[in-house]
Image (tube, rainbow, N blue to C red):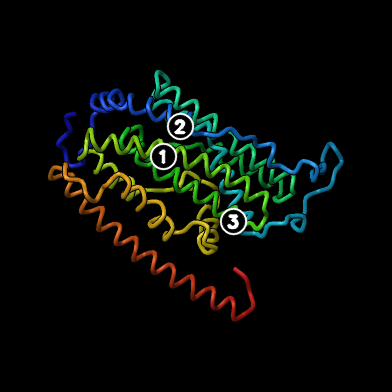
Amino acid sequence: MPQSTDAGLTLDRTQELALLRELEPVVEANLNRHLAVAKEWFPHAYVPWSAGEDFDGPLGGRAWEPEQSKLDETARTSLILNLLTEDNLPSYHHEIALMFGCDGAWGTWVHRWTAEEGRHGAAIRDYLLTTRAVDPIALERARMTHMSVGYNSPFGHRVVNSVAYVTFQELATRISHRNTGSYSGEPLCDQLLAKIANDENLHMVFYRNLLAAAFDLAPDATMTAVLDVVKRFQMPGSTVENYTRKSVRIAMAGIYNLRIHRDEVLMPVLRQVKVLERADLGPAGEQAREELATLLDSLDTAAHRFEEKRDAHLARQASRGVGV
């Protein structure tokens, strides 16, 4: 495949369309693989319906109060952030449908992915409301605010950048769900989020295999795209109101932080697609790879600084008998 020679080494639209066509057999093969290994599961089976009761309002039930929740504030924060992220599915579907199209294997994947993702938000919301884990009014207002903003990919509709982004993002989401479940201390919550995390892992594998194929077809452009994504990566929930405050709490609890992002998200994907050992790069690709290696070192240093500050903060809290 011909690659552009500009400084950013991005593919023009004609090249992008050619890449989409060249990737279609890989999409079809991985779609078939996904359908063969994905196991059916039912969100309703992980919601304790018998524990539910009416809220105040037209049904005249009991108003929500914080002490009704079995989850601490950090677990609630993480679950709400994860749920609001899932709530923006209509915007995500719009983005990937525009980018990948709705025909052929690409279209089949777009709709299958959307169907599987759709059960995540429904399941988490049903669990949270039935167990009275969160304020239902605040949750609905947060949903309305977040979905009203929508989601627009920071990478536009550039195919290679987007494939790289969703590969990292699906793995990051898997880890966030899994760690939230473990942190919650509630067995049913843990089981539900493990199911969701498994879906996200299968989605990551699908996209990771596409990323590997993109490297084979357009190594320099793909390396440049990976560098761009690692530089500018943000979780899709970063537009949630008060995201910074929420993400700091989650980071302090070890649910998702810079160390996890570097060591458990970026590095496993980069190793799997052999980014640091490829021998098929041109000068521009090599330059991007060198910059990527430097960036990874910088992230390692930043993660160390965060860990030192976190440990000092936790030590001060412990000395005063205060939790996270």
Assign a secondary structure to mark 2. helix
- Is 60 in front, or is 185? 185
Residue lying at 55% horizontally and 78% vertically, measured from the top left: 316
For marks 1 and 3 on the same chain, the one whose residue lies earlier in the sequence: 3
Residue 163: image location, x then y, percent: 35, 37
Name the residue type under label 2: His
For marks 3 and 2 on the same chain, the one whose residue lies earlier in the sequence: 2
Q: Residues within 10 Å of mark 2 (few under 14, many from 20)?
A: some
Assign a secondary structure to mark 1. helix
Cα gap from disc 1 to disc 3, whole angstroms: 23 Å
Horizontal placement of 313 versus 218: left or right?
right
Q: Residues within 10 Å of mark 1 (few under 14, many from 20)?
A: some
Horizontal placement of 152 versus 3: left or right?
right
Write down the quadrant of residue 142 in the picture. top right
Cα gap from disc 1 to disc 2, whole angstroms: 9 Å
Q: Which residue is mark 2?
A: 34
Q: Which residue is mark 3?
A: 182
Using the image, tell me which numbered label, if any, was put on residue 205. Answer: 1
Write down the quadrant of residue 147 in the picture. top right
